[in-house]
Amino acid sequence: MDYVTSDLHFRHERIIIFERTQFKTVEEHDKYIIEQWNSVIKDNDRVFVLGDIGFKPFSELGKLIKQLKGHKILVKGNHDQMVVGDAINMGFEMMYDHPIYYNTHIILSHEPVKEAWDNPYVYNIHGHCHNFQTVDASNFINVNIATTDYKPLSMNQFISKANLRCKSRKEKWGTEWYYPHLLQKEQDSRNN
C-alpha cells in the first residue's frame, strides 16, 4: 500500500519551539515520530516523504530514517541539502529534486505548486506549511506530519477524492471551464 507524509524535521530543535510544543526534547519528538510511523506502516508499504526530513549530520539522520518501516521515496524539501547518494545511504530508495505526478490526477510536492491552483484536473498533496496552514482551495492537501497525528496517510483516500473531484479530459466542446471567457472575448472583438 502507498502512503504519504511530510516535514519529519528529525533533529530539529527549533521545531519544538514554534510548532511541536508538546515535546520536551528533540529526542522525544524523533522517537514519537518513529513509533507513530511504525504503528501504521508495514515493511512492504511504500511511503512518499514530501521533504524536510531533518538536519545534518546525514549519518545521524540515516540512523533515524532506517528505523522507519517501508520503502521510502523522498521528494526533496527546502531543508533537504543532499544529493541522491546521501538519500540512498540514509535509507531512501529514490529521491526527486522536484514535484512528481503520482498518477494523472495527483501531484506530490514539498511546497504547494502553482500548477494546481484553480486547476480542475489535479490534486496537490504537499507539505511545507506549518501550524495547520494550507492553501485555501479544495484540491490542496497539507500532509505535514504534525497535522496527521505524526502518522503517514494512505494514498487510497486521496485517490478516491481526486477521482471524484477532478474533471475528465473528455469534456464536450463548450463545457470547459474557460469556455465563458472565450465567448466573452469573441463578443468583445465583435463590439470593437
Image: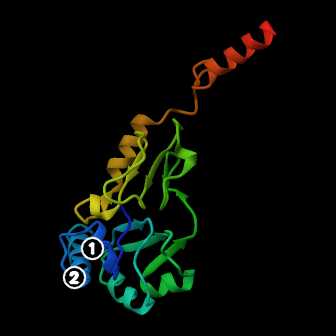
Question: Which dot marks residue 25?
Answer: 2
Give the image location of residue 170, x and y in percent.
58, 29
Residue in view at x 74 percent, y 13 percent: 188
- Taking the image as shown, residue 17 lies to the left or right of residue 82, namely left
- 50 shown above or below 138: below
Residue 174, by quadrant, is top right
Q: Residue furthest front?
A: 17
Residue in view at x 28 percent, y 63 percent: 146
Question: Circle 2 sits in a helix, a strand or a loop, which is it?
Answer: loop
- 112 shown above or below 174: below
Residue in view at x 43 percent, y 53 percent: 125
Q: Amino acid at mark 2?
A: Thr
Q: CA distance from mark 1 to mark 2?
A: 8 Å
Q: Nearer the viewer, residue 71 or 60?
A: 60
Give the image location of residue 158, x and y in percent.
37, 48
Question: Circle 1 sits in a helix, a strand or a loop, which is it?
Answer: helix
Q: Earlier in the sequence, mark 1 or mark 2?
A: 1
- Taking the image as shown, residue 44 lies to the left or right of residue 74, namely left
Q: Amino acid at mark 1?
A: Ile
Q: Nearer the viewer, residue 113 or 129?
A: 129
Query: Answer yes or no: do the residues labelled 1 and 2 have beta carbons within 8 Å?
Result: yes
Q: Residue furthest right?
A: 192
Q: How is the image coloured?
A: rainbow
Give the image location of residue 89, x and y in percent.
47, 88
The residue that label 1 is drawn on is: 16
